[in-house]
Amino acid sequence: MKRLYALSLLLLIGYQPVAHAHAVVTGYSLKMTPIHAHQADKVSLNFNSKIELGLSQVFLVSKGDQLTPLKIAQGDKQGQMMIAIPALAPGDYALKLKVFAADGHLTEDVIHFTVVP
Amino acid sequence: MAGIADFLDSLIGGFALICFAFAIGSLFWGLFVLRPWQREAGYPILLLEKTVKLMYLGGFALAGAQLFKIILKIWLMTAVLDKWPFPEFAGTTQFIGGIIRALLTGALASYCYLVLRKNPYSKQYWQTAGWVAVPMIISGAWLVHAAGRFDNPFLLMGLTVIHQLGAAAWVGGVFHLVNIWLMRSKGQIPDDLWPLLLKRFSLFGMASVGVILLTGLPMALQYIDSWNGFIGTGYGNLLTVKIILLGLALSLAGLNKTAVQDYLITRNDHTLTYRLPYYIEAEAFVLITLLFTAASLASQPPSIDIPNLTASWQEVLDMFTPRTPRTASPTHQALIAGEAGRVAIIGQIPSEAATAWSDYNHNIAGIFLTTMSVFAMLSYVKRLPPTFSVFERYLAYLTRYWPIGFVALGIFLFFRSDAETWPLGPIGFWESTFNNGEVLQHRIATLLVFVLGVIELIARLPRNQNSRLPYFFPILAAFGGLMLLTHSHVGFQAKSAFLIQVGHTLMGVFSLILACGRWLELKLDRPGKDIAGFISVAALFQIGLILLFYREPLY
């Protein structure tokens, strides 16, 4: 019985699901690389923790606050998200994020950017 | 209905910590303070039954809270993401870890109910309960903030769990002291158990606080890397509140310790009987609020992660700088006209009307509260100076019925809060209340203020002198403070949101002082009664001052 208990404890300690805290954006590629007009591109976002991609959404916000859902994928680094941006006309845009961190907090954020000619 | 889910989500974490304190605190109480196997003849069976009952009720409630938390997440995600979150949610830590913890907690509670309850004097069964609790305690590590960190996650998870154990031991112990006092008051336990258990808990409580501090400090250093991060972020702000509340609780605990030491020297049990139980009740108020603040802290991003969103200490100080209150409001038309630009994402235009509207609401509320608290403070003055003696006749009414100001404030807030909703704005009452967590909290706060005023007024009528109505005031005030401390969001404008939060959390702390002071005023004898009462209304005055000088950042 004691062995079974010890084994259960070890299993519990060994159980290591992916867990994350309240997710905030700590850096994004738009800061370094602007998006050029009429060219599809990819944007990377880095979070302070890993996020649940299946329960997260990113929208492109264009003039008049029109929302278009964007495709997202896991990046190469821990806590990195890749977003596919379609070809856009020059102007002001934003990314609206609804991100689910594994501690259960849904974080919403907006990142503004400009598409240069 | 997302508003209700959002509101409940902000409260469930604190509730779960209270249940944890009941379940695990009772276990520690039994194992280290009560030690039933050593005083088999001395402990009445009723005491042990009650101890075990608090433990399994806490356990069952915690298991329920854990499951409810999962249901809330599903509800919230469905509303926010506009889709059913399964099957993705089934693979997350929140779901798997939450279910495992609920099952393990249920197992602990069931063991206590089915086995320990029938053998409460047995050391072996108490120790087995301890072993059954271990997996449940460990499983909680995957549900805390630290589990998501990329750096030192296991160290931080371990520290958090031990920190929670220290808190559960202290808070659970205080809950049991309240229980012991209530049982003694009803004559259900021998009188000599009261000082004995107080003395034993004194040492145990100090050890618990030591554990809290020893684990809390390294965690704080991991999550906050600068003084600015401590002063200028929501995380640092709530940690500051935790430190203030810890100081308050320790001050009350210090009074308890001194009272026990005095009793052991003099054998005079006056303080032990007529004061100390109420200090402990006030300490319980503070500790419950502390647990809700701790839960709220877990929803904040650590300061170290948001250096670009940190406010400077000058910006924080500016929120409390005295200035002329705004006594003229912009028109409702001007407010509504600016809303479209304010909430726009592309081409957002900050609304000066919205900021002025909010400033006016806060500043007028400040005028209400400072005026009320001045009259309340005057009630502690026995006689006015001779020059003002002509006012004494009127003053008797004003100093007695000052809570009527709460009724007026409630009506004012009903019309002025959330001006885009009914009765002034186009969004309907039910639609706005149940779909927006912030509006729901404002509605509850408004109702709270109104009800608080009405009940306190009725309580002060001469025919209600001996009723229990006065006790509603501190309870509602504490609940109000709790709402102020748990109502924090990091949204689109994290820095602005923090600057709004910083004033509200400080008001939350003063609300708690108001509640504790009033509670002690109702319970203590003189001179403590008057001192506590004056501190209580002085705290109300401080809340009034914060509101009076409030300026919302433009966003």
Image (cartoon, coloured by chain):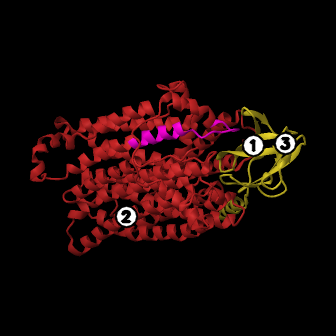
Chain colours: A yellow, B red
Callout 2 crowding tier (Cα within 10 Å): few <14, some 14–19, many ≥20: few
Callout 1 crowding tier (Cα within 10 Å): few <14, some 14–19, many ≥20: many
Horizontal arrangement in the rendering, residue B101 relative to residue B59 (left or right): right
- Rendering coords of residue B60 (x, y %): 52, 46
Query: Is residue A46 rendered magenta in the image?
Result: no
- CA separation in Å, label 1 and label 3: 10 Å
Say which amino acid is labelled 3.
Ile
Residue indicated by mark 2: B40
The disc numbered 3 marks a residue on which chain? A
In the figure, residue A38 lies in which quadrant? top right
Say which amino acid is labelled 2.
Glu
- The answer to whether residue B463 is seen in the rendering is yes
Say which quadrant the C terminus of chain A sits in: top right
- Rendering coords of residue B435 (x, y %): 58, 31
SS at badge 2: loop
From the image, state whether disc 2 or disc 1 is nearer to you: 1
Seen from the viewer's position, the closer of residues B476 and B442 is: B442
Location of residue A62 with respect to A15 vertically, above or below: above
**Which residue is farthest right?**
A39
Seen from the viewer's position, the closer of residues B365 and B111 is: B365
SS at badge 1: strand
Residue extent of the magenta highlight: B343-363
Horizontal arrangement in the rendering, residue B218 relative to residue B202 (left or right): right
- CA separation in Å, label 2 and label 1: 67 Å
Instruction: Answer yes or no: are tags 2 and 3 on the same subunit.
Output: no
Residue indicated by mark 3: A85
Q: Is the residue under label 1 in contact with that under label 2 (CB below 8 Å)? A: no
Horizontal arrangement in the rendering, residue B458 relative to residue B154 (left or right): left
Query: Is residue B352 rendered magenta in the image?
Result: yes
